[in-house]
């Protein structure tokens, strides 16, 4: 009885040797069990917190991977997105637009207006941030650099002209071999640019009655909306910094 009241006041030490009474053995075993339970609980809590931290980190890392890695371009500041309905043409019963009709001075001018100002001058600070070294302009301070979408459009225009040799043959100043190499470069360049941009807009399939078919056909419909970089905005940004060099005359 006396012992019991003592126990409640002083917690007697549990020693490792076997000199304790059966009762103390029991008390100590219970205490050890409690200690193990506490330790396990604490370990579980730590595990849970570190797991949570790890999961958060993983989720964060995923978000990081989703962030696009952009090679530095001074034109990044001109990038805006907009929804654009594509023009399809006769394959979806639409008339040709200004870029897709038969060759004419009006069509030629429309194409040139897309890209002719695509080479710009940049400050030494911007030039130093570019992935590749680029030459200085004649003034010796600013550097000259192209914005690639305009080069791709120039290339597509080269291919378009090559498809109408009767109309454009006389304006080709390069010799045959160089011209063939130029067209070959352009085809492969446009291919890589398309893969690079990888437009994931969806193309629906619909039953369509075309003018040049006797019965309705299930066909892809191309005059649908896409999310695009605002091309007009990028044109304005580029034209404002134009060096005055013409891409077609490079
Ligand atoms: C342009 O820079 C990239 C990356 O720094 C490099 O791999 C490539 O060889 C460079 N191109 C030229 C033509 O120097």
Image (spheres, rainbow, N blue to C red):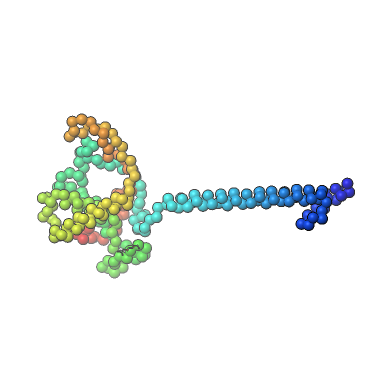
Give the percent coordinates (x, y) of residue 90: 20, 38
Q: Quadrant of residue 171?
A: bottom left
In which quadrant of the rendered view does residue 173 lie?
A: bottom left
Q: Answer left or right for 236 relative to 6.
A: left
Q: Report the residue at 27% width, 68% height from top.
A: 139
Instruction: Residue 94: tell me if it is visible.
Output: no
| The one of 60 and 129 positioned closer to us in this rendering | 60
Residue at the extreme top of the image, as rendered: 215
Q: Is residue 66 left or right of residue 169?
A: right
The residue lying furthest to the right in this view is: 2
Task: Answer above or below: position of 215 versus 88.
Answer: above
Q: Is residue 70 left or right of residue 53?
A: left
Residue 37: % across, % down: 69, 48
Q: Nearer the viewer, residue 50 or 97?
A: 50
Report the residue at 78% width, 57% height from top. Answer: 17
Q: State the residue at coordinates (11%, 55%).
A: 170
Residue 65 seen anywhere in this rendered image of the structure: yes
Measuring from the top left, give residue 101's x and y in whole percent: 17, 44
Residue 198 coordinates in the image, percent (x, y): 33, 48
Report the image quarter containing ligand 1.
bottom left
> Along the line of sight, which residue is nearer the eye, 188 or 249?
188
Tell me the quadrant of the picture where the C terminus can be found: bottom left
Residue at 67 percent across and 51 percent down: it is 39
Q: Is residue 67 above or below residue 137?
A: above
């Amino acid at each position: 009885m006396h012992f019991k009241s003592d126990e409640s006041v002083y917690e007697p030490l549990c020693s490792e040797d076997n000199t304790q009474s059966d009762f103390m053995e029991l008390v100590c075993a219970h205490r050890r069990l409690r200690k193990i339970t506490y330790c396990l609980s604490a370990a579980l809590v730590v595990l849970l917190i570190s797991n949570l931290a790890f999961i958060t980190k993983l989720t964060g890392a995923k978000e990081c991977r989703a962030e696009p890695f952009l090679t530095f371009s001074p034109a990044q500041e001109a990038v805006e997105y907009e929804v654009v309905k594509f023009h399809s043409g006769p394959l979806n019963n639409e008339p040709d637009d200004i870029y897709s009709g038969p060759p004419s001075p009006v069509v030629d001018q429309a194409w040139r207006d897309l890209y002719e100002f695509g080479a710009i001058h940049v400050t030494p600070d911007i030039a130093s941030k570019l992935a590749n070294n680029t030459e200085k302009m004649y003034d010796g301070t600013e550097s000259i650099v192209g914005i690639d979408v305009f080069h791709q459009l120039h290339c597509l225009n080269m291919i378009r002209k090559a498809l109408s040799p009767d109309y454009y043959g006389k304006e080709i100043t390069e010799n045959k071999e160089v011209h063939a190499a130029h067209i070959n470069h352009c085809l492969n360049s446009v291919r890589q640019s398309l893969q690079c941009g990888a437009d994931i807009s969806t193309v629906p399939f619909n039953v369509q009655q075309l003018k040049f078919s006797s019965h309705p056909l299930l066909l892809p419909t191309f005059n649908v909306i896409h999310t695009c970089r605002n091309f007009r905005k990028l044109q304005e940004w580029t034209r404002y910094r134009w060096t005055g060099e013409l891409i077609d005359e490079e």
